[in-house]
Amino acid sequence: MTAAPAPQTLRAPLVVEFPFTRSLGPVQSAFLTGLRERTVLGVRATDGRVLVPPVEYDPVTAEEIRDLVEVAPTGTVTTWAWNPAPRRDQPLDRPFAWALVRLDGADTALLHALDAPGGPDTVRTGMRVRVRWAEHRTGAITDIACFEPHDDRSEPGPRPQPRLHTGQFTDPVTGIVAPARLDYTYSPGRAQSAYLNALAGRRTVGERCPSCRKVYVPPRGACPTCGVATTEQVEVGPRGTVTTYCIVNIKAKNLDIEVPYVYAHIALDGADLALHGRIGGIPYDQVRMGLRVEPVWTDDSRYPDHYRPTGEPDADYDTYKELL
C-alpha cells in the first residue's frame, strides 16, 4: 500500500506598502530644510543639552523647545554595527556600518550609515567622521548620503561649538512623504491551505467548530469564540448577502480598478463569518445591505474577481444581523 503524498506547503511573497504623509512643525521643518542647505541643526533642551536630531518637546520636562543651534558636520562614532549585506533602499549598495555619531557641538548621537571601504576592521568606537552630502538634496535625512572617515588631527584649534540659528530658510520644507514597506514570505497553515486549494477549484470551504457549531470562512484552524481546534470542512456559498459596505473614492496604487467602487462584507450562505470582496455589475450607489450576490471568476484567477447581484430579492435583515 502506497502512502498518500504529503500536501504541498503553500508559500507566497507578500508586500505591505503604503506612503506615510506627515506635516512638519517649525523644528523638524528647519532641520530637514537645513540638510538641504548642507546645514545640520539641533535644538537646545531646557537643561542646556543640544539634541541632534532635534525634537519638539523636551524629553525630560515635556516642555516645547524651539531654540535652534547649528552644529558641525564632523563628529565621533559612539557605537556601531557592521552591515555585510545591504538591503534595497538602504543608504549604500555595498557593505557598510550603521553608526551612532555625536556631531561636534551635540550631546546626543545621530544614526546613519558609515562608509568604510576597508571593512569592519577599519571601524572603531571613537573614530572621527564627517558628513558626506548627497549630490541632489531635497530636504530629507537622505540629504546626508552617509558619514565617512575623517582624520582631523592636522586641523588646529578646538572643535566647533554650537551656534544659535534662526531656522529661517528660503522655501522651507513643510511636509514629507515616507514610504513604508514590509516584504515577507507568507506560509498559511493547514486550514488556510485547504481554503486556498478549494478556491483554486472555484469552491469555498470553511470549518465548523465542534462546540458552538459555527462555520468560519476563511477558516482559522480554531474557533475564535470557543478556543477549540476546527477540522470539519464545510462547503459554503457560492452565493451570499452583503452585510455592510464602503464606497472607495481613492484609487490605490497598482490596482487597475476605476473609482468609485464598492468593497463589502459578504456572508456566504452557510457561513457564520462574513468575508470581504468587491461588488461589481451594479452602479456603486445601488449597492445596499441585504443585496444578494454571487462570485465572478476570471479565467486565470485562483479567487473570485468580484461579486455581482444574483437578481434575487434582498435578504431579510434578521437573516444577517448577527453577522454585521
Image (cartoon, helix red, strand yellow):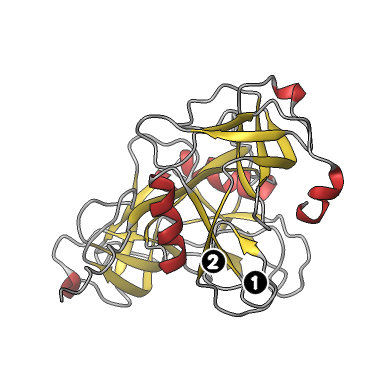
Query: Is 6 above or below relative to 218?
Result: below
* Contact between labelled residues 1 and 2, with CB atoms less than 8 Å apart: yes
Which residue is located at x 69 percent, y 45 percent?
A: 26
Specify the quadrant of the image occupied by residue 75: bottom left
Residue 9 visible to an observer of this rendering? yes
Picture quarter with the N terminus: bottom left
The secondary element bearing badge 2 is classed as: loop
Query: Is 23 above or below relative to 253?
Result: below
Query: Left of 86 or right of it: where is 1?
Result: left
Amino acid type indicated by mark 2? Arg
Query: Left of 150 or right of it: where is 70?
Result: right
Amino acid type indicated by mark 1? Pro
Residue 102 visible to an observer of this rendering? no
Query: Left of 213 or right of it: where is 304?
Result: left
Q: Which mark, by number, is residue 224?
A: 1
Question: In the rendered image, which residue does mark 2 sit on?
Answer: 220
Query: Is 240 above or below relative to 80?
Result: above
**Residue 274 place in picture, x, y as percent:** 66, 51
Q: CA distance from mark 2 to mark 1?
A: 8 Å
Specify the quadrant of the image occupied by residue 159: bottom left
The secondary element bearing badge 1 is classed as: loop
**Residue 272 place in picture, x, y as percent:** 68, 58
**Residue 27 place in picture, x, y as percent:** 65, 50
